[in-house]
Image (cartoon, grey):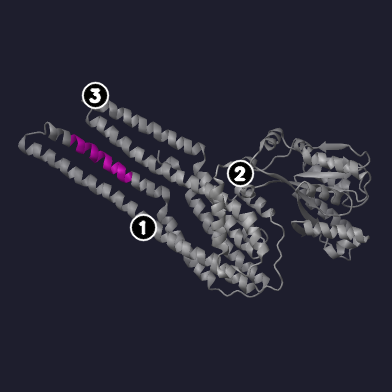
């Protein structure tokens, strides 16, 4: 299931002349660039890593103003290579089309627009009355192209710009920002020159490769995808949603969500298992040490006790060290963070809204600084073609779907989760108290033996002596066992998470009761408010669990 992999995007910007000659030679140069020549733009270690990637698909995302000539030629080649086109226009479509005189040119432009995943219009800050409006607009779109791209491809004759924002200016700007620039000569067809080569680094490529290559059974992923789709769109409220929106959620978001969830579940189970075994081993090591000390006069008993304690401590160290090396704890939190962000994105896309535009989706991540989770999320979302909700649709149907399918579902989940974690925490608390109560009881019995010996002058012998010594071992071990149970409780943070779930259910109940006006702005605000609450809660949970590290056991 390649759809559940996060695709590594290489963002390519384009600049060049509108009038081109010898198109076959120029096309051959572009084909060569997209085949292998772009590798030379990366620093060597990343170039080698990219070429060795097997589980991580690589695609080109072309950022193009779609002007005549170079912009469209590069767009055609990138699309033939299975790449993604992002239209970055210097001015509104109606105004921009005035620069394309022939009907054929306008038709080409419109056709490329329909193939674009996203269409963005830059703002140059000048009005249409400004005599330099067009030159300023072209300069601004060139600057934005350079800012967004990893590599700039320039179809250029090497001559100075003949106006503001010309190819020479854009190439100079890219070089100033230390971006790799591949110059395809228009005066010497067939010549390609790389400037600033060996400087580009791929963000988080190792983390993406680890995510994509994590071994998960395909049948499990398919079952997870099917159940998740049913969970989201199985209600009557979802029947009227456009099939296109549901299909985008199904193909672009759910597979990656299920992969992240499965990885998080694996790491969470391993984290809990290591935590449980860690505290068990530490308790047993105390027991064997106590046994060895109590029976110190009997080497046949004490030496095996010391050996057992040593083996348990070594096993504990090895187990925690392996878990740390495998990044069990951060792996759980990071993949859970990605899954939660994708789950929120389901409902945006299902309603024809982008999870990235506006407030909530861009502000909240796993950490305050950018992480691979943020990067992967943006890569996944950028693969979704532009969304446009049918104008005839009533926003109330979407609002009902959101409130009943998303918010009410989360209220139910958090209510049940709070009750479940509270019960589990209470059970662990009872076990810890039981250990201390038993320790008190054993100590009283032990004290009884001592008082009896003082009162009668007879000290335990034979089996009574063995019994007294074993009670000493138990008396030493039980407090350690109680502390281990308490430590495991702290490691899981169940009481705090339960409290957060209760507060979350109350907060969401308040939101669902608020009326929402039947306007796009009000609906968008409602979506972002829910998303912000959801992701802040997720962020707080992650911040809480980030400090519950396995080193506590040691």
Apparent side of residue 115 relative to residue 486 in the rendered image (left or right): right
Q: Are marks 2 and 3 in contact (CB under 8 Å)?
A: no
Magenta region includes residue 471: yes
Question: Which residue appears at 28% of the width and 30% of the height?
Answer: 305
Q: Which residue position holds label 3?
A: 299
Tag 3, which secondary structure? helix
Mark 2: give few (<14), some (14-19) or many (20+) Cα within 10 Å. many
CA gap, disc 2 to disc 1? 37 Å
Quarter placement of the C terminus: top left
201 or 253, nearer to the observer: 253
195 with respect to 554 (left or right): right
Identify the element where label 1 is drawn.
Answer: helix
Residue 513 percent coordinates (x, y): 53, 73
Asked whether the beta carbons under mark 3 and mark 1 sit within 8 Å of each other, the answer is: no
Distance Cα–Cα, label 3 vs label 1: 46 Å
Are there few (<14), some (14-19), or many (20+) residues within 10 Å of tag 3?
A: few
Q: Is residue 475 magenta?
A: yes
Q: Which residue is mark 2?
A: 212
Q: Residue 432, image x and y in percent?
A: 30, 49
Mark 2 vs mark 1, foreground winner is: 2
Q: Residue furthest left?
A: 456
Question: According to the image, label 1 marks what residue?
Answer: 423
Q: Is residue 156 above or below residue 164?
A: above
Give the mark nearest the N terminus, 2 or 3: 2
First to last magenta residue range: 468-483
> Dot 2 lies on which element?
helix
Relative to 449, does residue 314 appear above or below in the rendering?
above
Main secondary-structure element of the magenta-colored stretch: helix
């Amino acid at each position: 299931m390649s759809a559940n992999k996060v695709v590594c995007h290489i963002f390519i910007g384009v600049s060049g002349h509108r009038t081109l000659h010898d198109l076959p030679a120029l096309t051959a140069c572009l084909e060569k660039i997209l085949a292998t020549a772009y590798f030379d733009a990366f620093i060597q270690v990343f170039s080698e890593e990219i070429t060795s990637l097997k589980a991580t698909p690589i695609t080109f995302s072309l950022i193009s103003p779609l002007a005549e000539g170079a912009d469209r030629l590069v767009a055609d080649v990138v699309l033939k290579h299975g790449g993604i086109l992002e239209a970055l226009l210097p001015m509104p479509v109606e105004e921009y089309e005035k620069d394309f005189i022939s009907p054929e040119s306008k038709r080409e432009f419109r056709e490329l627009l329909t193939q674009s995943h996203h269409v963005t219009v830059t703002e140059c800050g000048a009005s249409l009355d400004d005599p330099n409006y067009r030159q300023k607009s072209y300069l601004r779109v060139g600057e934005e192209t350079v800012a967004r791209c990893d590599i700039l491809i320039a179809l250029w004759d090497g001559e100075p710009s003949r106006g503001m924002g010309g190819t020479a200016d854009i190439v100079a700007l890219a070089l100033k920002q230390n971006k790799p620039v591949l110059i395809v000569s228009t005066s010497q067809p067939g010549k390609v020159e790389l400037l600033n080569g060996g400087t580009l680094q791929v963000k988080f490529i190792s983390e993406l490769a680890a995510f994509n290559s994590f071994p998960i059974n395909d049948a499990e992923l398919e079952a997870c995808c099917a159940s998740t789709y049913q969970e989201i769109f199985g209600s009557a409220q979802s029947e009227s949603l456009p099939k296109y929106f549901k299909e985008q959620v199904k193909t672009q978001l759910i597979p990656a969500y299920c992969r992240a969830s499965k990885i998080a579940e694996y790491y969470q189970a391993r984290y809990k298992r290591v935590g449980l075994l860690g505290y068990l081993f530490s308790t047993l090591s105390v027991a064997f040490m106590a046994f060895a000390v109590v029976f110190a006069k009997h080497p046949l008993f004490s030496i095996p006790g010391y050996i057992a304690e040593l083996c348990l401590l070594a096993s504990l160290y090895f187990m925690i060290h392996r878990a740390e090396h495998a990044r069990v704890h951060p792996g759980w939190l990071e993949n859970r963070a990605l899954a939660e962000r994708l789950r929120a994105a389901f409902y945006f896309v299902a309603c024809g809204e982008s999870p990235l535009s506006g407030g909530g989706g861009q502000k909240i991540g796993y950490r305050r600084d950018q992480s691979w989770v943020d990067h992967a999320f943006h890569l996944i979302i950028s693969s979704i073609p532009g969304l446009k909700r049918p104008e005839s649709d009533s926003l109330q149907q979407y609002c009902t779907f959101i409130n009943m399918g998303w918010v009410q579902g989360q209220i139910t989940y958090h209510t049940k989760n709070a009750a479940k974690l509270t019960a589990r925490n209470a059970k662990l608390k009872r076990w810890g108290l039981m250990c201390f109560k038993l320790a008190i009881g054993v100590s009283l019995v032990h004290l009884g033996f001592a008082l009896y010996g003082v009162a009668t002058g007879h000290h335990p012998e034979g089996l009574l002596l063995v019994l007294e010594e074993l009670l000493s071992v138990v008396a030493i071990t039980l407090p350690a066992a109680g502390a281990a149970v308490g430590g495991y409780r702290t490691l899981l943070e169940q009481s705090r998470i339960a409290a957060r779930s209760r507060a979350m259910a109350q907060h969401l109940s308040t939101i669902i009761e608020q009326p929402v006006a039947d306007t796009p702005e009000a609906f968008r605000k409602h979506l972002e408010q829910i998303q912000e609450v959801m992701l802040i809660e997720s962020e707080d949970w992650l911040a809480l669990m980030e400090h519950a590290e396995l080193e506590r056991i040691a």
